[in-house]
Amino acid sequence: MTDFNQCLQDLRESYDQQPLRRTDLAADPFVQFEQWMQEAIDAKIYDPNACSLATVDSDGRPSARAVLLKGLEHGRFVFYSNYNSRKGSHLLANPHVSMHFPWFPIQRQVTVMGDVARVKDSLAEEYFNSRPYLSQIGAWASDQSKPLDSRETLEKSFLAAKEKFGENPPKPPHWGGYSLQPRSIEFWQGGPNRLHDRFLYELVEEQWKITRLNP
Ligand SMILES: Cc1cc2nc3c(=O)[nH]c(=O)nc-3n(C[C@H](O)[C@H](O)[C@H](O)COP(=O)(O)O)c2cc1C
């Protein structure tokens, strides 16, 4: 075995924080999610609202990347991006996604599955206007996911957008939000001897049904 593979095989954590029991769970998964997000924030996890978003292209090939959760609106998980990006083109062809929150330092993960739709422009504008000025300019400067010949071209595009839009850049038409309406949400808490606790909330006839899963 190579040293590298040996090193990987020797990496081993044991999961020994608090267990998750059925009686600990809120009936409403959004209440449960908000509680766990607050605990992730309190535990000072770096970027606690960062999650992996998995999409599939029109041939069914998956890809994942990080996005930041920016709100829970009427039971939907909201994030923002460039509609012309690679993920944007995937979502046009196929709205089915999975969103994964990796809260490893507290031995937890949450996995959300469902469909996305674009949010209203008014909500996207409200959020865009709350962003730092230079991030607003950055949204104009970057043709997200498209090939770029050099860093210099990007920086020139940034300066040109600054010049063009001045102090109050409008939201670019190609930039906006997506909201994920979950069909299922799974809460995972690491347990000793790989006997982890997993609870799956599934929407069945408009009610959340909770099932414990094998780890
Ligand atoms: C911690 C973190 C947070 C990110 N948040 C966002 C985000 O909220 N929206 C976004 O479009 N890209 C975000 N990105 C960049 C994406 O991961 C990705 O590189 C970009 O959206 C292009 O993805 P695509 O080519 O698959 O569309 C983030 C990256 C990291 C590492």
Image (cartoon, rainbow, N blue to C red):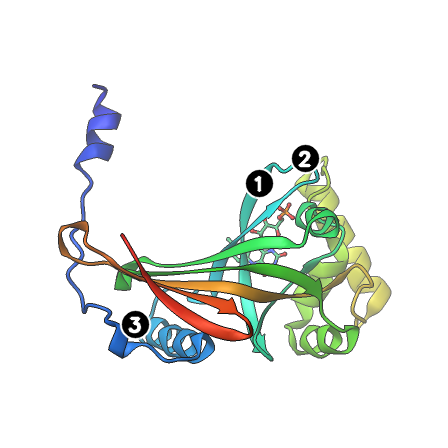
Say what secondary structure mark 2 lies in: loop
Indicate the position of residue 87 as horizontal and vertical percent values.
66, 49
Q: Which amino acid does label 1 sit on?
A: Pro
Q: Which of pointers 3 and 1 indicates the residue nearer the eye? A: 1
Indicate the position of residue 69 as horizontal and vertical percent values.
54, 67
Q: Mark 1 points at which residue?
A: 62
Q: Name the residue under label 2.
A: 59
* Residue closest to the eye, 72 or 96: 96
- Above or below, 37 against 56 in this view is below
Position of residue 54 in the picture relative to residue 144 (left or right): left
* Residue closest to the eye, 132 or 44: 44
Callout 3–callout 1 Cβ contact below 8 Å: no
Say what secondary structure mark 3 lies in: loop
Q: In this view of the protein, can residue 167 be seen by the observer? A: no
Say what secondary structure mark 1 lies in: strand
Q: In this view of the protein, can residue 12 be seen by the observer? A: yes
Q: Which amino acid does label 3 sit on?
A: Ala
Position of residue 137 in the picture relative to residue 204 (left or right): right
Indicate the position of residue 190 as horizontal and vertical percent values.
24, 58
**Residue under the image location 30 percent in, 72 percent down:** 43
Q: Mark 3 points at which residue?
A: 43
Q: In which quarter of the image is the N terminus?
A: top left
**Label 2: few (<14), some or many (≥20) within 10 Å?**
few
Lower sequence index among marks 2 and 3: 3
**Residue under the image location 45 percent in, 64 percent down:** 185
Callout 2–callout 1 Cβ contact below 8 Å: no
Q: How far apart are marks 2 and 1 (CA)?
A: 9 Å
**Label 3: few (<14), some or many (≥20) within 10 Å?**
few
